[in-house]
Amino acid sequence: MSRLLGFGTYDRDQHPRVGVLLDGLAASGWEVAELDRPLGLSTADKVELLRKPWLLGKLVARLATRWAGLVGGRLRYRGRHAPDVVLVGYLGHFDVLLARVLFPRTTIVLDHLIFAAGTAQDRGESGGLKLAVLRVLDRLATSAADLVVVDTPEHGARLAPAVAARGVVVPVGAPEDWFAAAEAPQARAGEELSVVFYGLFTPLQGTPTIARALRLLHEEGAPVRATLIGGGQDLEECEEILAGVDSVTWTSWVPAAELPAVVAGHDVCLGIVGTSAKGQDVVPNKVYQGIAAGCAVVTSDTAPQRRVLGDAAVLVPAGDEVALATALRRLAGDPAALAAAHRAAAAARDAFHPAAVVAPLRDRLAAEAAR
């Protein structure tokens, strides 16, 4: 049995992607262990630190304490306990450099779900020097790994030519607790269509478009009730758009362990509808998770989402609140359409289990070991 070590400062609760990879490989017969010291910073915190170099001291100090724990923990993984593969978790731009030093002759896999430069641009950074530094960071991180896991071919195309051959496309998928949530009985909202969105309110997600669509539905008296969970960059704008709309419930956040059941209690889970360049390249967590939880999903009609989801989701043009409102209005007013959307999503669920989505990585690792 091959041994794999999950390594880094990742947080499974905040970034379930790494858990999907580890659990999927474990389900595929790998012996999986973890050496993890969570950094305690959200994606938004990390991007903010990268955008403001004068705050990097905070990151360095926190990273130093976590790395000390990782270096000490390394002693447990020597000799017969040494891993065959080290998988560095999501947002591991710095961790992969440490992994390369600590495991110099071991296959290193970097879960490169986001590019630092692209994410900073998506969140409003336009400074040429800062973006150049972040591009260098992306290149250093990916160059330190033997295999670089990305989530879509579009992200794979952004890898530097020197490392492009190391890229492996692995869909994001959903953790098993999301599938379990769909199997538990849930209370439904009755005559109203219940819609949920959760996220960090970033430009990628297009939450102002979602807010404007919900405003349109409220003004026409459509039987749609929405729950908006989370907060971030575009929250204030969304609150202004939806001021006085009593068909929307706001929740600052839900603990990770409770979120699957909360989402599963709704008819529809919203994906993303942002128009940014990054929004055109991804299939977000919430799309996979919403389908796993038994919801119908409405999200933007982009090349990667169309390719991965096909008929499993209702696709609308990015940035088009009228089209989004029209799609939700139809699901609210036509029980047959809603039932069909649920059936289509359910038909795709099995492909998004951890053991299914890791197949490309599992096969690539097997091929590398056979060389």
Image (tube, rainbow, N blue to C red):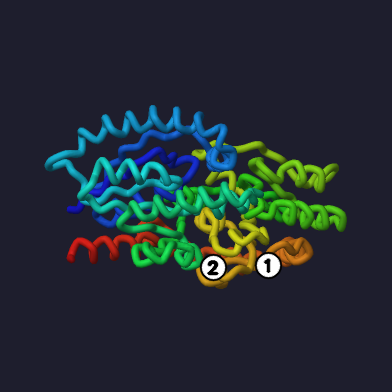
Instruction: Left or right? Give the position of 161 relative to 327.
Output: left
> Where residue 252 is drawn, which disc sits there?
none
Q: Which residue is mark 2?
A: 304
Instruction: Left or right? Give the position of 222 relative to 80.
Output: right
Q: Which residue is mark 1?
A: 316
Distance from disc 2 to disc 1, alpha carbons, whole Å, reads 13 Å
Decide which of 261, 212 is in the foreground and name it.
212
Decide which of 345, 1 is in the foreground and name it.
1
Disc 2 and disc 1 in contact, CB within 8 angstroms: no
Query: Is the residue 249 above or below the residue 115 in the image?
Result: above
Give how far across and how far down residue 103 sits, in percent: 24, 44
Does residue 106 appear in this view? Answer: yes
Q: Amino acid at mark 2?
A: Pro
Instruction: Left or right? Give the position of 347 relative to 359.
Output: right
User: Pointer 2: residues within 10 angstroms few (<14), some, or many (20+)?
Assistant: many
Total residue callouts:
2
Which residue appears at 36% of the width and 59% of the height?
358
Does residue 333 appear in this view? Answer: no
Q: Which is more foreground, mark 2 or mark 1?
A: 2
Give how far across and how far down residue 114 sits, in percent: 49, 53
Quick one: SS at disc 2? helix
Which residue appears at 81% of the width and 48% of the height?
241
